[in-house]
Image (cartoon, rainbow, N blue to C red):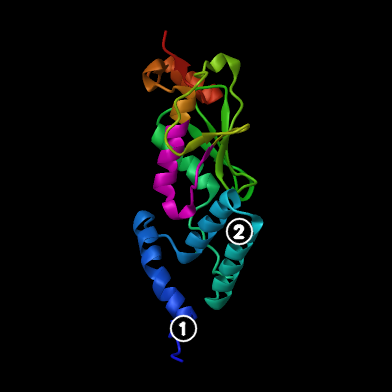
Amino acid sequence: MDTIQTDEVTPRTMAEKARPLYELYADAYPGAQIADLITNLAHLADQTTDQGGAATLRNALLHYQAEHDLAHPVPGTEYPFSISDISRATARLLGPGWLAESGSWGVSGSLCGPYLTEFVFVVDYEGDLAIEFRPATNDGFPEVPELPDGVIRSDQGVYLYLASAADGLKALAERSAAAIRAVTGYDPAEFDFESSASRQHHTDTGRYLRKG
């Protein structure tokens, strides 16, 4: 009786099959690492499969880290920027009248603008980059804002769907600034950034006056 030949399944053959998929992922997310891919797959498994799928992926991440000595990375190399850095970069993009401050240890950042509402950047309990806020009545934010793609409403504010450090500081700040413009309806033309009275008000309170 003839013996049926089957391909031997080894770590090498599995890696060869996975390489094209990883290259597609890396092209879509420049700078992404294999650990980022496994982490994102685990996040997806939580939403689409039972806990067994997510546990398998997390175990794969642990094994990968151990094999490549990534369980103890050199400080500052695993995450090149902090959450507070994202809030500060967002403030720069929003322009005059916006100021960000770091929370303790840089794990959060608060952002204030020409409104009473304060925006707090955090990583929520599901690992998403979230912007939390409670709109002040007098700020007059849109009741139903048209949020950008990938920005999801939550009970605490909004979060950036599938945001990752691999996206880079610039891209995360751009998404965050777009989210804040949407929820506030921010239009810099509505505010006085030039008059001495408004400048003095900004010095005293951190906020510019509205025109008119």
Q: Which mark is residue 75?
A: none
Horizontal side of residue 115 vs 56, given as left or right: left
Residue at 49% x, 79% y is: 11
Dot 2, how many residues are within 10 Å of its Cα: few (below 14), some (14-19), or many (20+)?
A: many
Q: Residue furthest bottom?
A: 1
39, 55: nearer the viewer? 55
For the record, the magenta segment spans 159-179
Expressed as whole percent of the image width and height from the top left, the position of residue 110 reads: 57, 37
Quarter where residue 211 is shown: top left
Horizontal side of residue 46 vs 16, given as left or right: right
Check residue 164 for magenta coloring: yes
Q: Are marks 2 and 1 in contact (CB under 8 Å)?
A: no
Expressed as whole percent of the image width and height from the top left, the position of residue 23 reads: 36, 64
The Cα atoms of the two marked residues, 2 and 1, are separated by 26 Å
48, 87: nearer the viewer? 48
Residue at 52% x, 35% y is: 152
Q: Quadrant of the C terminus?
A: top left
Q: Nearer the viewer, mark 2 or mark 1?
A: 1
Q: Earlier in the sequence, mark 2 or mark 1?
A: 1
Q: Is residue 169 above or below residue 6?
A: above
* Residue type beneath disc 2: Ala
Check residue 169 for magenta coloring: yes
Residue at 48% x, 57% y is: 80
Q: Which mark is residue 54?
A: 2
Q: Residue furthest top?
A: 212
Which is the main secondary structure of the residues drawn in magenta? helix
Residue at 44% x, 82% y is: 6
Q: Residue furthest front?
A: 1
Q: Is residue 209 above or below residue 101?
A: above
Residue at disc 2, secondary structure? helix
| Label 1 sits on residue | 8
